[in-house]
DNA sequence: TCCAAAAGCCCCACCATAATG
DNA sequence: TCATTATGGTGGGGCTTTTGG
C-alpha cells in the first residue's frame, strides 16, 4: 500500500483503500449491523485481505503461522462462518447430499434414513431430502432433477422397489448415486444387508427344529428384498432336499399377512412359515389366533426385520434382525468412498442379518393339527 | 493490469481469453456443452434480454404476453431451471426449510415428516433435514445453527419432547420456528392434533360402555402429547364423577406397556384402560395374554395413534386415529402462513383425532363374552 | 414494453506482486 | 539473481434488482 499513511484519514484502512481504488468489485461495505459477518469483515478485523482469510478457512498453504492465528482469532471473535450458499456457488458443489426416500415410512427405511442423516452430519454434510409416499417414475425423476440443481454431491435412494433403481439408472444425474438395493444392480453403488443370507438363517432355523414343510409368505414382486429373501428361503430348502412351494405374495402390510395366513391355514400343508417381514407376521399371527391354530404349537412363524414391537407380539416373534441404523451409516460411508474415488468405491452388501429366536418357533408337532374352537381364552 | 496483455502471446488458452475479455462482467460465454443452461442461454434463445427472462420466471409485470410466451417456450426447449444456489445468493433466501426430527423414527413422526416433505415440495420448497435419534440440547442447538447458516427460511421441529421446544425458544434463530407441540407454548408457532380431545374420546367411549374404573397408562413425563392425553383422560373421568387414579408412566415402547400391564393386572382395580399409544397397548395386550386375562372380556383397552398394525393386534385394537399425513401438511401450511405474515399466522392445533372402535373394548364383564371371530373359514 | 448496464450476494481460483532468503 | 514464501488483486459463478434509457 504505497504510502497510505500519508493521508490523514489513514485509520480507515482497507475500506478507505477500496473506496479510493474505485474498481470496487471487491471489498463490499461494512456489514450492516443485523447481518451475518462476511469474509471481508473478518479480513478487516484481522488486518489482512479477504483471501488470506479464505486460505486460512480452507487450510491452504502460504499463510504465515502468525497471520493464521490472527485470522482465526478474528473468525472466533466475530463468530463468523462461511456462507454455504456462496461456497456452493463458487465451488460448484454444495456440501450436501440428496436423500430420496420413496415408499411408506416404515420402521426400516425410516431408521436407515435417520442413521444416514446422523452419519452425514458427522461427516460434515448437509442432507436435502426429497421424499415421496409412493414411488412414481415421474415424481422420482423430478426429485432427482431438483436435487441435481441444488448441486448435491451425491444422491441416495432408500426404496426397496426395483422400479426406483431402474428410474435412477435411466437418468444421467451427473452425480454419483448410491442406493439401498439388495439385488445386483450394475451402474450404481449399492448398500444392503444380505437378504438371502438372512432368509436362509430363518429357514435353517426351522429346518433345524425339524420342520419339513416350510411355507413362505413373500413381499411384493417389485421388491428386491422380497426377491432376495425368497431366493434365500428356496435355496435353504433345496439344500436340504425339502419341497419348495410357490410363496404367497403379500405387500408388506399386516392385512396381507392376515390374508396369507388364512390361505396357508386353509391349505394346511405347512408346519412352519417364513414371513417376509414382521408386519405381515403380525397379520398371520392374527389369522392363526382367529382360526384357533396355536403358534408355535401348530405352526412355527419366523418374521423379518425385528421391528421394536416384534418382541411383544403374541407369541413373541422369532425374527431376523436388521440393524437399520448401521445400514444408514453404511450408506454414508459408501457415499464418502464414492466421493473420494468413484471407481474404487466398494459396495457394502455383505452384512448379514441376525436371527433372534423368541417364542413363535418350536419343533413341529408330530400329531395332526387339533383345532380348538376359535378364540377360546386360555383361562 | 495496465496493458500487460498487449504482448503477442494472446494464444495461451483460457487464461489469455479471460485476460482479453477484460470488462465482461455480464454476458458469460455460451454454456459449455455439458453444462446446465443459464438464464443467458434462454435469453439468447428467445431473443430477449436476460432480465426479461428473469421477469417471466418471477411472474413480474411489464412483459408483453407474446414475449412471455416466447420466453416460456425457450425455457421449455432448453429445459432450463434456475439455479437454486444462485437464486439463494441473490435473493438472500434459500427456498428451503429446515426440518429437525428428534427422537425415535416412530410411525407418527416419520409419517408427519413425510407429509411435510411432500407438502413442502408442492409449495416449491426444498427441505434440509437435520435429524437426531435422541434429543440432546447441544446437538439440537447445533442443528439449528447449521440450518440457519444454510439460510433456511423457517425451521420445523418434529419432536414430542418439551425440552426440544425449550431449547428452540432459548435460541434466537432469526427465522420463524414451527413446532409440533400439543401444549400451549408462547413464542413459537404450533401445529398439533388436539390430544386432550382425543383422549377424552377414548375415555368417553369406555364410560359409555359402562366402565367406571378406568386406568391410564401414560407416555413419558417430558412428552407434551402424553401430558395432554393425560389431561384429557382425567377431565373426562372427572366430568362423569369417576375416580381419577395416578397414571402409570411408560416410555412409548411396547416393553413399558408390558410392564404397565403387569402392574395394572396385579392391582386388579381397573376394568378398562386408556393407553398412551398403540405400541404400549401391544405390550399391555401381551401382558394380559400371559396372565390369562381376556381382552376385552376382562379388560377393555384403548390405544392411541392407530398405527397400521393396530388392526391386527390380538384382539384388534380400539384406538384413536391421528392422521399424521395431514399433520405434516398442516405444518407446511403453517410455515407458509408464517412466511407470509409472521404475526398473523394462526396455529393449527384444533384438529381432533378420531376414535376407531375395534375389538379390544366391550362393556365390563356382564356375562362371559362369547364371540365368534370374524369369518374363521371353517370349511 | 422492453433493453442495457451495472451493482450486489459471498466465496474460490488463479495471477501478480512484495517481501524474504 | 533467482527461488521461495506470504500476501493482495481481479474475475467469475448465476441470479435479482435498480437505474436509465
Image (cartoon, coloured by chain):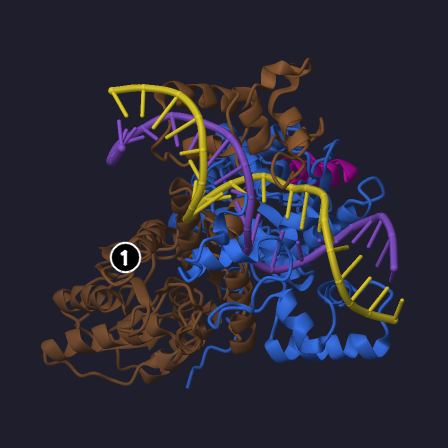
Chain colours: A brown, B blue, C yellow, D purple
Q: Quadrant of the C terminus of chain B?
A: bottom left
Where is residue A177 drawn, in percent x and y?
38, 64
Instruction: Write down the region rendered in magenta.
Output: B227-243
Circle 1 chain:
A
Q: Quadrant of residue B77?
A: bottom right
Q: Is residue A226 visible in the rendered structure shown here?
A: yes
Asked if B366 appears above or below B227 in the picture, the reply is: below
Q: Is residue B362 visible in the rendered structure shown here?
A: no
Where is residue A87 drawn, in percent x and y?
51, 45
- B261 or D17, which is in the foreground? D17
Asked whether B236 falls inside the magenta stretch, the response is yes
Q: Residue at x 37, y 34 (%)?
A: A59
Where is residue A243 drawn, in percent x and y?
17, 83
Q: Quadrant of residue A55?
A: top left
B75 to the left or right of C14: right
- What kind of element bears circle 1? loop
Where is residue B87 drawn, in percent x and y?
65, 54
Q: Quadrant of residue A65?
A: top left
Our reading of the magenta stretch's main secondary structure is helix
Q: Residue at x 50, y 35 (%)?
A: B135
Instruction: Give the residue pinned by disc 1.
Output: A341
Amino acid at each position: 500500500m504505497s504510502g497510505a499513511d500519508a493521508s490523514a484519514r489513514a485509520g480507515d484502512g482497507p475500506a478507505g483503500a477500496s473506496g479510493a481504488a474505485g474498481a470496487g468489485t471487491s471489498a463490499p461495505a461494512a456489514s450492516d449491523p443485523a447481518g451475518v459477518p462476511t469474509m471481508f469483515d473478518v479480513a478487516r478485523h484481522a488486518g489482512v485481505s479477504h483471501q488470506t482469510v479464505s486460505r486460512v478457512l480452507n487450510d491452504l498453504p502460504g499463510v504465515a503461522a502468525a497471520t493464521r492465528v490472527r485470522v482465526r482469532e478474528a473468525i472466533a471473535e466475530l463468530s463468523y462462518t462461511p456462507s454455504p450458499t456462496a461456497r456452493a456457488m463458487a465451488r460448484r458443489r454444495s456440501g450436501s447430499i440428496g436423500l430420496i426416500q420413496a415408499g411408506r415410512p416404515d420402521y426400516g427405511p425410516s431408521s436407515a434414513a435417520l442413521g444416514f442423516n446422523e452419519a452425514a452430519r458427522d461427516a460434515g454434510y448437509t442432507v436435502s431430502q426429497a421424499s415421496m409416499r409412493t414411488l412414481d417414475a415421474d415424481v422420482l425423476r423430478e426429485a432427482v432433477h431438483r436435487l441435481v440443481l441444488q448441486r448435491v454431491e451425491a444422491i441416495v435412494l432408500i426404496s426397496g422397489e426395483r422400479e426406483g433403481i431402474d428410474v435412477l439408472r435411466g437418468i444421467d444425474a451427473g452425480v454419483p448415486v448410491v442406493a439401498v438395493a439388495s439385488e445386483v444392480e450394475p451402474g450404481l453403488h449399492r448398500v444392503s444387508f444380505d437378504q438371502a443370507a438372512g432368509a436362509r438363517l430363518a429357514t435353517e432355523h426351522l429346518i433345524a427344529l425339524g420342520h419339513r414343510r416350510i411355507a413362505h409368505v413373500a413381499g411384493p414382486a417389485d421388491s428386491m428384498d422380497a426377491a432376495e429373501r425368497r431366493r434365500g428361503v428356496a435355496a435353504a430348502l433345496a439344500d436340504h432336499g425339502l419341497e419348495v412351494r410357490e410363496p404367497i405374495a403379500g405387500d408388506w402390510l399386516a392385512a396381507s399377512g392376515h390374508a396369507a395366513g388364512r390361505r396357508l391355514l386353509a391349505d394346511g400343508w405347512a408346519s412352519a412359515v417364513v414371513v417376509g417381514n414382521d408386519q405381515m407376521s403380525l397379520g398371520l399371527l392374527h389369522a392363526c389366533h382367529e382360526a384357533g391354530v396355536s403358534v408355535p404349537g401348530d405352526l412355527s412363524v419366523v418374521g423379518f426385520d425385528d421391528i421394536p414391537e416384534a418382541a411383544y407380539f403374541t407369541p413373541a416373534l422369532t425374527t431376523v434382525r436388521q440393524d437399520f441404523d448401521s445400514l444408514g451409516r453404511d450408506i454414508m460411508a459408501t457415499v464418502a468412498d464414492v466421493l473420494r474415488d468413484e471407481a474404487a468405491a466398494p459396495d457394502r452388501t455383505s452384512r448379514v442379518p441376525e436371527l433372534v429366536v423368541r417364542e413363535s418357533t418350536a419343533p413341529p408337532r408330530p400329531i395332526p393339527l387339533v383345532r380348538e374352537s376359535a378364540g377360546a381364552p386360555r383361562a
